[in-house]
């Protein structure tokens, strides 16, 4: 199933998960698949699977999990492909593996640059990777976008121009980086419209359950943390349960506002946490 077809019925709700570590204990692996059972029971339109397990470059874990999701649950699966992890030849091999596994969707990303330099440079930008995948396959290609502007972009106008290049290269739908200020997202959608970007765009939402969790992500992704959000984190930082509940409430508030404005869909960064994801989905189920 090519998940772009899900947008025939909007809004589309989807999830992102991480594969379990290759050397995870039997207990941890069983816990992961129990969590996945819970996430699948929430009936997302599709589930995207990050590349490798625990930050590794072992794409076998991503491929195996995508296959499992599709066969075991009958849910569409999306395999992440970071440009930094591939050269032209290894990409061809991986695309062949995806085809053999009947995985029809990929999320093409540049990926975070390693501190010691990128190992491969055949695809300097995500748009280069999208174009290569488009040439070599008939996969449905998803792309990423940044409501708070990509941290390496000159400004928001240039950022959207680069995004248009990615769409023109073959991306049929987009998922946004997480954000915590909805007005930034709505302004981003306006810039996309002006640039002639007409593919479906899902809002990426993550419920924050601890302060450390978001600090690194915000720094890497250039995500702005609004005063209301910072106040919440500071107030509840010493109470884990309260922080979790406040994070869920903040995410639900964001989603309700987004859905009321008619967004194409919501992509939940689950962090493999079924309890939090279940509570968010329960809170919004009558709205979709």
Image (cartoon, helix red, strand yellow):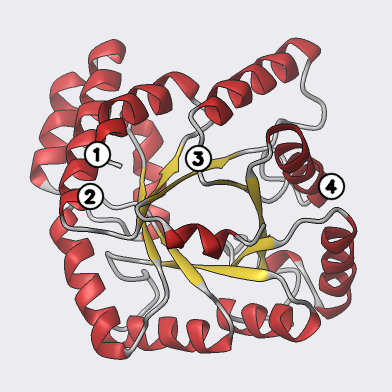
Query: Mark 1 or 4, which is nearer the eye?
Result: 1
Which comes sooner in the sequence, label 2 or label 4?
4
Q: Quadrant of the N terminus?
A: bottom right
Identified at 59% across, 63% down, the residue is 111
What secondary structure is found at the residue carrying circle 3? loop
Identified at 36% across, 30% down, the residue is 281
- Residue denoted by label 3: 44
CA–CA distance in space, label 3 to label 2: 16 Å
**Depicted 56 relative to depicted 186: above or below:** above
Residues at marks 2 and 1 touching, judged by CB atoms closer than 8 Å: yes
What secondary structure is found at the residue carrying circle 2? helix
Please give the label number shown on residue 259.
Answer: 2
Query: Mark 2 or 1, which is nearer the eye?
Result: 1
Left or right: 224, with 173 as reference point: left
What secondary structure is found at the residue carrying circle 1? helix
CA–CA distance in space, label 2 to label 1: 7 Å
**Depicted 188 relative to depicted 216: above or below:** below
On the question of residue 156 being in view, the answer is no
- Residue denoted by label 1: 287
- Residue denoted by label 4: 60
**Depicted 24 relative to depicted 191: above or below:** above
CA–CA distance in space, label 4 to label 3: 23 Å
Which comes sooner in the sequence, label 4 or label 3?
3
């Amino acid at each position: 199933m090519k998940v772009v077809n899900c947008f025939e019925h909007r809004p589309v709700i989807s999830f992102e998960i991480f594969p379990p570590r290759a050397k995870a204990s039997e207990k941890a692996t069983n816990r992961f698949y129990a969590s996945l059972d819970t996430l699948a029971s929430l009936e997302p339109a599709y589930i995207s699977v990050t590349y490798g397990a625990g930050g590794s470059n072992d794409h076998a874990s991503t491929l195996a999990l995508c296959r499992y999701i599709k066969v075991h649950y009958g849910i569409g699966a999306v395999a992440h492909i970071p440009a930094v992890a591939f050269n032209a030849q290894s990409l061809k091999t991986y695309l062949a593996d995806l085809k053999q596994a009947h995985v029809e969707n990929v999320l093409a990303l540049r990926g975070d640059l390693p501190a010691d330099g990128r190992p491969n440079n055949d695809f300097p930008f995500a748009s280069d990777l999208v174009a290569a995948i488009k040439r070599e396959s008939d996969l449905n290609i998803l792309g990423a976008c940044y409501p708070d502007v990509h941290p390496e972009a000159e400004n928001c106008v240039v950022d959207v121009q680069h995004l248009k290049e990615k769409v023109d290269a073959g991306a049929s739908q987009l998922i946004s980086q997480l954000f915590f200020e909805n007005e930034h997202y709505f302004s981003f959608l306006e810039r996309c419209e002006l640039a002639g970007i007409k593919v479906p765009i899902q809002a990426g939402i993550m419920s924050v359950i601890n302060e450390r969790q978001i600090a690194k992500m915000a720094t890497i992704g250039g995500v702005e943390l609004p005063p209301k959000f910072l106040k919440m984190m500071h107030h509840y930082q010493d109470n884990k349960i309260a922080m979790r509940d406040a994070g869920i409430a903040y995410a639900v508030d964001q989603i309700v506002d987004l859905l009321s404005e008619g967004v194409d869909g919501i992509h939940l960064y689950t962090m493999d946490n079924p309890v939090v994801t279940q509570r968010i989905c329960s809170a919004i189920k009558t709205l979709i």
